[in-house]
Image (cartoon, helix red, strand yellow):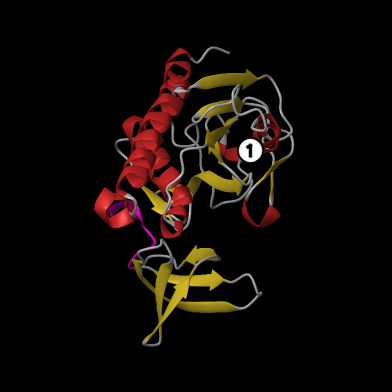
Amino acid sequence: MDFPQASAVASRFEYLAESASTNAAMRVLSSDADAWPHLSVVLTDNQTAGRGRLDRSWETPAGSALAISVLIRELPSDPEAMGWIPLVAGLAMADAVTVQLADHQVGVKWPNDVLVGDKKLCGILAESTGSAIVLGAGVNTAMTAAQLPVPTATSFAALGAVADEDRLIADYLRRLDGLLSALSAWGDADRSGVHSAVSARCVTLGREVEVSLPDDSTLQGTAVRLERDGRLCVDVDGAERLISAGDVVHARLA
């Protein structure tokens, strides 16, 4: 497959006819820093053993979804800013999706899912290699309604749209690069404008949520804001809880 627009944006672009996991492939390739610079990309439409957050498996029929991994070497120096990288990826993908699904509400569910309406179109997984970050994203493109794994998922095809995959990836990379450059240049999410931009796209804010925490406990409350370091602030019966990691479920809107 040809991706001329995306190839022109990426510093290096490799399309794989099949990959067990583009993130795993990129982690191996990234050991050669000269050959794989900042904003290098590995992409496939046939990922056979992908992983999502919390080690969930992510498998799709061949040709029905795109799996893309982007290598991020130019990292912000402030540790607090590092927490924004998955959120920035979600914002960049939401903006790229909106270009093609302008008649739909597209937003980011904290920390890094892209929703169309209340259904998940894309998930993002950020993994550290020690000196770099691998940003993996899986986008449901041609998956039919019958092929969707859960009722809370969606795809371009299920929404009656045909994705321009090359433009989608090119738009994602441009926006991602711009946001990360601003975050690194300014050093924090507030001065770079990242905090306000992500907050404006975050459809979790203002919603009643249930959060499953890493220790297997859960909490319920209202998501009220994003903290300076990207953590989610949840009001639980008048007491604020700051969430750095967790699985968020939105309460259904009436």
Give the quarter of the figure containing the C terminus: bottom left
Residue that appears at 67% across and 29% down = 29
Point out residue 95 in the picture as x, y percentages from the top left corner: 34, 38
Q: Is residue 169 magenta?
A: no
Asked if residue 161 can be seen in this view, the reply is no
Point out residue 157 in the picture as x, y percentages from the top left corner: 49, 31
Q: Amino acid at mark 1?
A: Gln
User: Please, is residue 174 above or below residue 231 in the view?
Assistant: above
Q: Secondary structure at mark 1?
A: helix
User: Please, is residue 217 above or below residue 14 in the view?
Assistant: below
Residue that appears at 71% across and 24% down = 18
Looking at this view, is 96 or 176 the one in front? 176
Looking at this view, is 194 or 77 the one in front? 77
User: Please, is residue 207 above or below residue 180 in the view?
Assistant: below
Looking at this view, is 244 or 151 the one in front? 244
Give the quarter of the figure containing the N terminus: top right
- Magenta segment, prevailing SS (helix, strand or loop): loop
Point out residue 195 in the picture as x, y percentages from the top left corner: 31, 55
Looking at this view, is 49 or 241 the one in front? 241
Residue that appears at 52% across and 31% down = 141
Residue 124 placement: quadrant: top right
Q: Which residues are magenta?
A: 199-206
Dot 1: within a 10 Å radius of its alpha carbon, few (fewer than 14), some, or many (20 or more) residues?
A: some
Residue denoted by label 1: 147
